[in-house]
């Protein structure tokens, strides 16, 4: 019996040990590796200054890398920059079209720059402006567009070359929630039609509602990577250190859904789902003759990161307040 093995698909983006040190000596990327598979909707989540724009800048050839490797659908960025760039559409963090041009012209000229014939470009521009709900604004001065409209125009422009990989750097920064949701819908449509999407954001909510996979970057390093669901499950686990009266028994009780590990003879390390009733755990421990004298919340690296993502404090990190819980 013969079996044809399907070759594994090439990642839409493959980054290996990417490093970037700016002339100012800032080490913005300290060895980043990640893969984004074709068709994925991938979030690069991280606080201010994490290195998101630097990574995207390198992938889209706006920033030179210091070392490492970048491949776009198998094409090495350094070996064949032109070919790699033709596969990518970029929506940069800052609005960068000419405010004194009309949306239709902005799109058609952009496509022309990438060699798309004018007839094709005109047709695509109408399609893209309609999708962006900007068709009525096709010939107004783009300076008069609202902030949300300008952002949508940036996406429409990037789609003019029919990129296989669309990269967006904080596409919804500073946009109110209603407009943001509208943009999410557009991006989901683009992704459903087959375009791989990578976006950076510091809104967990945005990553959660859009993305299947994500990487979290902090201070130039990837600190978490994987499916969104797995990450949320991790955030859903709470850790405690329990101080025990007397000595722990040689064999610890098994409590379904929790992980119990003896730190030392008097301390138990407990991990349990957030929704679980702590009293049930204490009752089961009590049945095994284990009496808890006091407890401390174990700091959770991921949680600390999220406090910084959502709360915004010093980059050196402040411990989140331990939740009050009665023992
Ligand atoms: N052109 C540059 N020259 C020197 N340093 C830079 C330059 N661009 C970025 N940096 C520094 O590199 C680090 C990473 O910046 P980057 O813009 O990549 O972060 P980011 O994750 O996009 O942040 P934000 O969420 O604020 O956009 C920061 O310390 C930043 O000050
Ligand atoms: Mg940025």
Image (cartoon, rainbow, N blue to C red):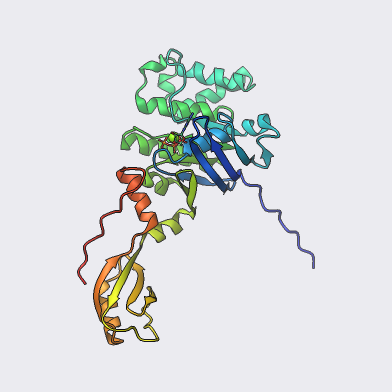
Res 282 → quadrant: bottom left
Q: Is residue 195 something that shows in the picture?
A: no
**Outermost right residue:** 1
Res 229 → quadrant: bottom left
Where's ligand 1: which quadrant? top left
Q: Number of numbered discs present?
A: 0
Q: Is residue 228 above or below residue 162?
A: below
Q: Could you tell me which quadrant the C terminus lies in?
A: bottom left
Res 324 → quadrant: bottom left
User: On the rendered structure, is 28 left or right of 276?
Assistant: right
The residue under the point 50% across, 18% down is: 106
The residue under the point 35% across, 80% down is: 265
User: On the rendered structure, is 47 left or right of 297?
Assistant: right
Question: Where residue 200 sits in the image (x, y, percent)?
Answer: 45, 40
Q: Is residue 90 something that shows in the picture?
A: yes
Q: Nearer the viewer, residue 48 or 109?
A: 48
Question: Where residue 175 sits in the image (x, y, percent)?
Answer: 34, 32
Q: Nearer the viewer, residue 282 or 220?
A: 220
Q: Is residue 238 above or below residue 253?
A: above
Q: Could you tell me which quadrant the N terminus lies in?
A: bottom right
The residue under the point 43% across, 24% down is: 95
**Outermost front residue:** 25
User: On the rendered structure, is 266 left or right of 16?
Assistant: left
Question: Where residue 249 sits in the image (x, y, percent)?
Answer: 35, 86
């Amino acid at each position: 019996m013969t079996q044809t093995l399907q070759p594994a698909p090439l990642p839409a983006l493959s980054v290996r040990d990417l490093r970037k040190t700016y002339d100012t000596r800032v080490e913005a990327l300290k060895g980043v590796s990640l893969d984004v598979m074709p068709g994925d909707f991938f979030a690069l989540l991280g606080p201010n200054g994490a290195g998101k724009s630097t990574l995207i800048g390198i992938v889209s050839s706006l920033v030179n890398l210091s070392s490492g490797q970048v491949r776009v659908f198998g094409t090495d960025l350094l070996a064949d920059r032109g070919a790699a760039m033709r596969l990518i559409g970029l929506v940069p963090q800052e609005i960068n079209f000419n405010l004194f041009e009309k949306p239709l012209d902005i799109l058609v000229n952009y496509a022309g720059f990438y060699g798309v014939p004018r007839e094709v470009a005109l047709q695509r521009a109408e399609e893209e402006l309609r999708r962006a709900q900007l068709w009525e604004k096709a010939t107004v001065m783009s300076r008069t567009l609202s902030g949300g409209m300008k952002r949508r125009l940036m996406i429409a422009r990037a789609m003019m070359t029919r990129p296989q990989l669309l990269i967006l750097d904080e596409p919804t920064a500073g946009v109110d929630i209603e407009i943001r949701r509208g943009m999410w819908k557009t991006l989901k449509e683009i992704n459903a039609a087959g375009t791989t999407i990578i976006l950076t954001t510091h809104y967990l909510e945005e990553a959660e509602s859009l993305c299947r996979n994500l990487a979290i970057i902090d201070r130039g390093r990837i600190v978490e990577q994987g499916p969104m669901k797995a990450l949320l499950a991790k955030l859903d686990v709470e850790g405690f250190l329990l101080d025990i009266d007397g000595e722990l028994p040689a064999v610890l009780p098994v409590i379904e859904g929790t992980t119990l590990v003896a730190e030392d003879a008097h301390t138990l390390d407990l991990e349990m789902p957030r929704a679980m009733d702590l009293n049930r755990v204490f009752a089961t421990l009590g049945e095994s003759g284990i009496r808890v004298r006091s407890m401390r919340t174990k700091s959770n690296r991921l949680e600390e990161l999220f406090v910084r993502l959502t709360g915004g404090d010093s980059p050196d990190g402040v411990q989140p307040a331990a939740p009050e819980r009665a023992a």
